[in-house]
Image (cartoon, rainbow, N blue to C red):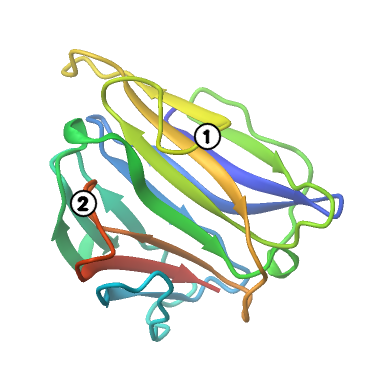
Amino acid sequence: MKKLRFLVEHNNSLKPVFLISFGNDSSIYLFPYGKKGVFSYGRSTIPENVTAHSFKYNPRENPEKHPKLSIHESGQVHVCSENKQVAGPITISPLQIWSGQHIATVQVDSFSGLASRAKQLKNTTTLKDHVVKCEKGVENGRFAIYCNYSEPTFSTHCPIRLELVRPHLPRVMYFGVSLIASTPLEGEGITIITGWPPESSTSEPMDFLFLRVE
């Protein structure tokens, strides 16, 4: 399995949120899903001592294009569209340095604003659908992604754990995913953010890249 697509089951409907694709090395690629296929991407900075941050974005892509946010094994992070780099790069620690820290977030505006799809799920050698059921009363959330090169433990509880085995890696690399309930936001889109180091702290400004789709 090289690609894993995450869907939420909300109000008896299956709604695609994002896809994670694994490279031939240990790089990962993130693709968000949206109703219109209108994308925005760029770079922003969270000021020091700030835990909540808003940033501006402008739609840039035509519906037929589907950018991806890449987190490479080397630690280079960028957004690419049609094999061209359009945002970044930002350099973080190589993935083999990570030991369970939070590496990326997929923030949904509102589960009710996501497009529904047929209930036929994929389960092939290259693509598998994974459905996350929302608890009653949960109207929105964000998927937090974690990385650990040493063991399948993460800085928070992750019900979803992925193992990445590659011939050049002396050990298994682990990724954890956790759905965290949150208050619905304005809009009908999905935003992926990443690009901070594993030892990031709110006491210092933090750069990040974002990829958004509506």
What secondary structure is found at the residue carrying circle 2?
loop
Q: Earlier in the sequence, mark 1 or mark 2?
A: 1
Q: Residues within 10 Å of mark 2 (few under 14, many from 20)?
A: many
Which residue is more in the foreground, 177 or 8? Answer: 177
Where residue 170 appears, x then y in whole percent? 18, 13
Residue 110, which numbered label? none
Secondary structure of the residue carrying numbered label 1: loop
Where is 42 relative to 156, above or below?
A: below
Q: Where in the figure is residue 66, as x and y percent of width and height?
A: 42, 63
Q: Is residue 203 visible?
A: yes
| Identity of the residue drawn at 76% across and 38% down | 120
From the top left corner, tell me how far across and down residue 119 is, in percent: 79, 43
Residue 83 location, quadrant: bottom left
Residue 40 image-quadrant placement: bottom left
- Left or right, 6 with respect to 134, comes to left
Which of the image's four quarters has the C terminus?
bottom right
Residue type marked 1 = His
* Label 1 close to label 2 by CB (< 8 Å): no
The residue at 16%/51% (across/down) is 92
Position of 62 with respect to 79 (left or right) is right
Q: What residue is at 26 percent from the left and 48 percent from the top?
A: 71
Query: Which residue was labeled with disc 1?
Result: 157
Give above or below for 118 relative to 168: below
Viewer-closest of 44 and 6: 44
